Amino acid sequence: MNFTKWQGCGNDFVLIDCRAQELADYGAFAQKACDRHYGIGGDGILVVLPSDKADFRMRIFNTDGSEAEMCGNGIRCFARYLYDNGITKKRKFTVETGAGILVPEIIEADGTVTGVRVDMGEPVLAADQIPMKGYGANRVVNEPVEVAGRSWRITGVSMGNPHCVVFVDDIKTTPIEEVGPVFETQERYPKKTNTEFVQVLDRQHMRMRVWERGAAITLACGTGACATLTAAVLNDLTDRKAEIQLDGGTLTIEWDERDNHLYMTGPAVQTFAGTVEA
C-alpha cells in the first residue's frame, strides 16, 4: 500500500488513500504503522475516503487504534495532500469528518502554497454535549477541580471532540507527563478528553502544551488550539484572535463574532512517501 507522511506543527500522520479499496481493520493498521520503532511512526493515520455528503471524507485513528472524531492539524495535511496531488483543483472544498462537515482552504502566495486555513465551525460549550458529566447543559468555565491530588481550574469545550483547557502560571513547571493521563481518564469526561495546559503571554499570544486522548503528548493539536482560544476568550484572558505557540510550531486561531466559527491557519508539509504492508 502506498502512503505519504505529513506533519503540521510537528503533529505527524501516516496518510493512506482508500477511495478505491478500504482496509479491513484501520485500528490495527494504525497501531502498527504509528509505532516509531517498528513501523513508520506517527501520532495517527489519516484515511482518504469518498463521501456522499461532502467532496471527501476523512477518518483519523490514534496510535492506540481508537478513532478520533476530528484532528485540526490532520485536516490541514489531508487538504494539502488532495490539492498537491491534483485530486481536487479547488482551493476551498468540503470534508466530511466525525465532527461534521468542515471547509479547508489552501492559502497560496505567488503560486506557492503557504498554509491551510480551516473553518472549524462553532465550538460546543454545553457540558452535556461535550460531553461532561455532572454539569447538565451549563457551560463549564474556570471550574475548580481536584485532579492528581492538586487543585486546578478547567474550562470545557468541544470542537467535535472533547477538550479540557487548564490555564497555568508557568507551562515549564507543569508536570504534563504525570497529570495528563489522569486528566484524560477523569470520570467527568465519559469519552475521555484531550487536555490543554496553557500559559497566557499577552492578549494576542499563548503558549500551549497538549496531552491528547489516545496519543499522549504530541507536538501540536489543532482542535486543542481552537479550544484554547475559546476558553481564553470565555475567561477574558485574550482577544478573539491570537497566535498559539505549540511544541512544534505556531497556529493562528480566530473566533469570528460574525458567524461564531473558529478559523485555524497553519502549515501542512509532506515529509516523505513510501509503501507499507496493509
Image (cartoon, rainbow, N blue to C red):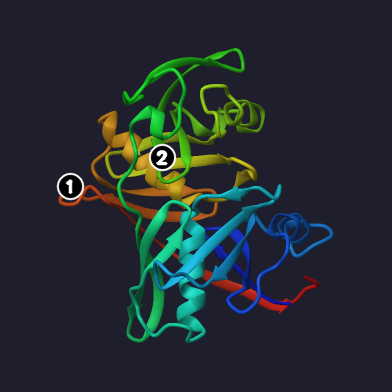
Crowd rating for badge 1 (residues with CA inside 10 Å; few <14, some 14–19, many 20+) = few
Q: Is residue 253 left or right of residue 196?
A: left
Q: Secondary structure at mark 2?
A: strand
Tell me the element at label 1. loop
Q: Which residue is mark 2?
A: 158
**Coordinates of residue 32 in the picture (x, y in percent):** 78, 58
Residue at figure coordinates x 59%, y 68% from the top left: 6
Residue 171 can be seen in this image: yes
Residue under the point 28% across and 32% down: 234
Q: Is residue 29 left or right of residue 137?
A: right
Residue 268 can be seen in this image: no
The amino acid beneath tag 1 is Glu
Residue in front for this viewpoint, 210 or 86: 86
Do labels 2 and 1 touch, CB within 8 Å? no
Residue 29: quarter of image = bottom right
Position in image of residue 28 (x %, y %):
76, 56
